[in-house]
Image (cartoon, grey):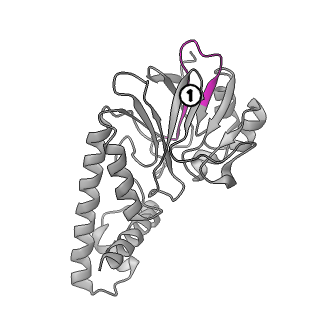
Amino acid sequence: MPADIKRTSPLTRSLLAPNAGPMTLDGTNSYLIGAADAPALVVVDPGPLHEGHLAALAAAGRVELVLITHRHADHTAGSVRFAELTGAPVRAFDAAHCVNGDPLVDGELIAAAGTSIRVIAAPGHTDDSVCLHLPGDGEAGSVLTGDTILGRGTTIIDGDLADYLASLEALRALGPATVLPAHGPVLPDLAASCTAYLAHRHERLDQVRAALARLGSAATVAQVTDLVYAQTDAAVRFAAEASVRAQLAYLRAEA
């Protein structure tokens, strides 16, 4: 195994893309799924359009399929080029990000790379987010969570908050599976991570409620962000505003 490709679970390895930044943490984790005796691999999130990164992924073994967790460019920008390099179809929940492959379907069971991969629709981070469940990956299985759950910190809500909370509840029901996130380190317990994320989201909702009580019910996204995310770095202000927008929509629908 090349030194920069690391073992992340019995059935997976990962390669970190060279795209570190405020939103990507250390960079995007591109995953390779494959049983020890499998003749081919599945690649998840080929990442940015970086020739060295894509070439290293392609050199890891014959790629039979590429899966995308969601539409953001740090996961998808290299997809077309990677399909050219490997000849493998690219499948995503959104047909706009498929290359010579069909859109993914919630609950679909994919037999590839010597194992089974179950598709779990997990909208919230984006409306097209999916997680990929590997029930045979170790004692409790594993889940490739994309940006729905990160290896550290919390994620932006670029979709619907009610959907996101429901996605976390659904993932929590899978129990103590290994979390294989698209950014940050591997985590040991999916249920525990979901519980922590749910608590954080409800805490943020309480803070937004308090901000509205102070500012008035017609407060703008910018005004609420100034109060609730006062310490946020300017480089990720847009992400804080996206989450506030989703939180306001949730609370106003609730009301």
The quadrant of the rendering that contains the N terminus is top right
Quick one: 22 or 118, which is closer to the camera?
A: 118
Nearer the observer, 67 or 58: 67
When the figure is inspected, residue 33 is found, relative to residue 68, above or below; the finding is above
Q: Which residues are magenta?
A: 27-42
The disc labelled 1 sits on which kind of residue?
Leu
Q: Position of residue 157 (x, y in %)?
A: 42, 61
Q: Residue furthest top?
A: 37
Are there few (<14), some (14-19), or many (20+) residues within 10 Å of tag 1? many
**Residue tagged by mark 1?**
32
Secondary structure of the residue carrying numbered label 1: strand
Q: Is residue 154 visible?
A: no
Residue 187 included in the magenta stretch of the image: no
- Left or right of 114, for residue 97: right
Q: Position of residue 140 (x, y in %)?
A: 34, 27
In reply to whether residue 32 is colored magenta, the answer given is yes
Q: State the count of labels.
A: 1
Q: Is residue 24 left or right of residue 114?
A: left
Tell me which corner region of the image, top left, top right, bottom left or bottom right, holds residue 135: top left
The one of 210 and 198 positioned closer to us in this rendering = 198
Q: Residue at x 46, y 48 (%)?
A: 147
- Front position in the image: 126 or 121: 121
- Say if 152 sits above or below 37 in the image: below
Q: State the residue at coordinates (30%, 43%).
A: 193
